[in-house]
Amino acid sequence: MARFIVTADIHGNYNSWLTIKALINNDDSLIIAGDIFDTRYGSYADPDFRPESIMQELLVLPNNAYYVYGNCDSSSYLPDFRPELEFHAFSRKIYLHHGHGHVHMHGHEDTDIIIQGHTHIFKLEKKNQKIFMNPGSLTCPQNGIYTYGIIENGSVHIAELKTGKKLISISYENA
């Protein structure tokens, strides 16, 4: 695995999904921190609202994908969804959740990287040896900056979509 591309809050927007797919190289993996489909509130009157197309393509995506549902996703839409997920990569323990409601960190004290979405605003910071990431949104960022996250062996970044420029980076020690 080369790296993770991290995103959130797609909200059924097919053009955003195509953008995400274009960012992923063959050896990359994908992390989506919820609100992929927006099957709870989304508008089928919008021609770009295509949660079914996104779901079909996600299920056959050749890259590894890790995802959780958000407050706008119906948990019955894709039964493999979970509200939270924990996994290991780059010798790090990663905790993924959407970020709405109360987040239960009990039992995740040994987590190295915590990823959430929900706010549509990018954020990357290190507190008490833990890295907290919100990749922002490629669909409807609240601050007008279209961003996504990157996790590589030894570093975590927030990148701006239009330029590819890394806005914030945090390095961590390799295990």
Image: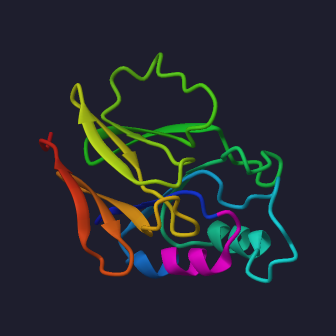
| Residue at the limit of the structure toward the front, as seen here | 143
Which secondary structure type mostly characterizes the magenta part of the structure? helix
Residue 16 part of the magenta segment: yes
Range of residues picked out in magenta: 11-20
- The spot of residue 144 in percent (x, y) is 47, 67
Q: Position of residue 160 (x, y in %)?
A: 34, 70
Instruction: Please state if 75 lies on the left or on the right of 170 as rendered.
Output: right
Residue 107, above or below 167: above
Q: Is residue 30 among the parts visible in the rendering?
A: yes
In the rendered image, which quarter is residue 91 located in? top left
Q: Residue at x 31, y 47 (%)?
A: 124
The image position of residue 93, as x and y in percent, is 35, 36
**17 part of magenta stretch:** yes
Query: In which quarter of the view is residue 175 placed?
Result: top left
Q: Toward the viewer: 59 or 137?
A: 137
Left or right relative to 7: residue 52: right
Q: Residue at x 65, y 59 (%)?
A: 36
Residue that sits furthest to the left in the current view = 173
Residue visible at 46% across and 60% down in the picture: 143
